[in-house]
Image (cartoon, coloured by chain):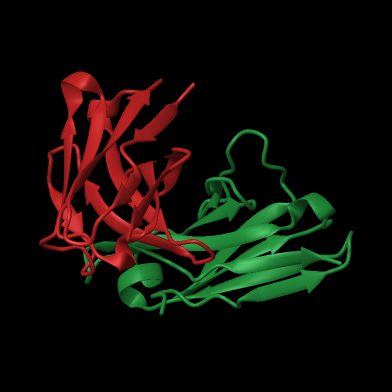
Chain colours: A red, B green
Amino acid sequence: EEQLVESGGGLFRPGGSLRLSCAASGFTFSRSDMHWVRQATGRGLEWVAGIGTDHDTDYSDSVEGRFTISRENAKNTLFLQMNSLRAGDTATYYCVRSDYFYTMDVWGRGTAVTVS
Amino acid sequence: QSVLTQPPSVSAAPGQKVAISCSGINSNIGNNFVSWYQQFPGTAPKLLIDENNKRPSGIPDRFSVSKSGTSATLAISGLQTGDEADYYCGTWDSDLSAGVFGGGTKLTVL
């Protein structure tokens, strides 16, 4: 079964840092494009960052320069380093796999991040 | 303010058909694949259907999609109370080099 499991969420101070992790299993992680998508309570989905199989990265304007997405293929793990945290970063963060057409076909259960 | 525009809510009676629209521009819907996601309260979103009407295992063919130019539509026929959920459209925006979603549509089956 294709599975993504996020970890690393919790309560953090404004201006602080944290690193989210996402453990992938059941598929060839190294051949998959990966993303982080977040959702604040009661709000819609917001794409945060993506990384391709070639390690090329993209970021939303709201996190550019503060967040860094990375991957360690040998450990089938995706990361999101989050620096200079703001209250507006409070959300559930989902690890997501996409196909070549950016169809997000596998989602994790999410990890909650609170900045307060 | 979401890049893609969806109605905040739609409703219909059981057994009826409903359509949810998703509007964008050339750099997103106009030139990239659109997918739809379903989210029940308290759970993670999941892929519902892609632009080619390909559905993951377990998703019935009561769900279908269409696209014309810079707009896409999700249609749900034979509505059931179990279809009550939030529905999101999503795609890539080539100009922004970013993923984009609609604001989500809450479906109520009356």
Viewer-proximal residue, A11 or B34? A11
Left or right: A112 in relation to A74: right
The spot of residue A106 in percent (x, y) is 45, 38
Q: Quadrant of residue A28?
A: top left
Left or right: A76 in relation to B72: left
Which residue is painted at 29% across and 41% down in the image? A34
Measured along the vertical axis of the image, is residue A97 above or below residue A36?
Answer: above
Which residue is painted at 59% across and 73% down in the image? B21
Which residue is painted at 67% across and 74% down in the image? B9
Measured along the vertical axis of the image, is residue A64 above or below residue B53?
Answer: below
Residue B6 visible in the displayed image: yes
The spot of residue B48 in percent (x, y) is 58, 48
Which residue is painted at 34% across and 59% down in the image? A47
The spot of residue B7 in percent (x, y) is 60, 78
The spot of residue A13 in percent (x, y) is 24, 56
Viewer-proximal residue, A79 or B99? A79
Q: Quadrant of residue A100?
A: top left
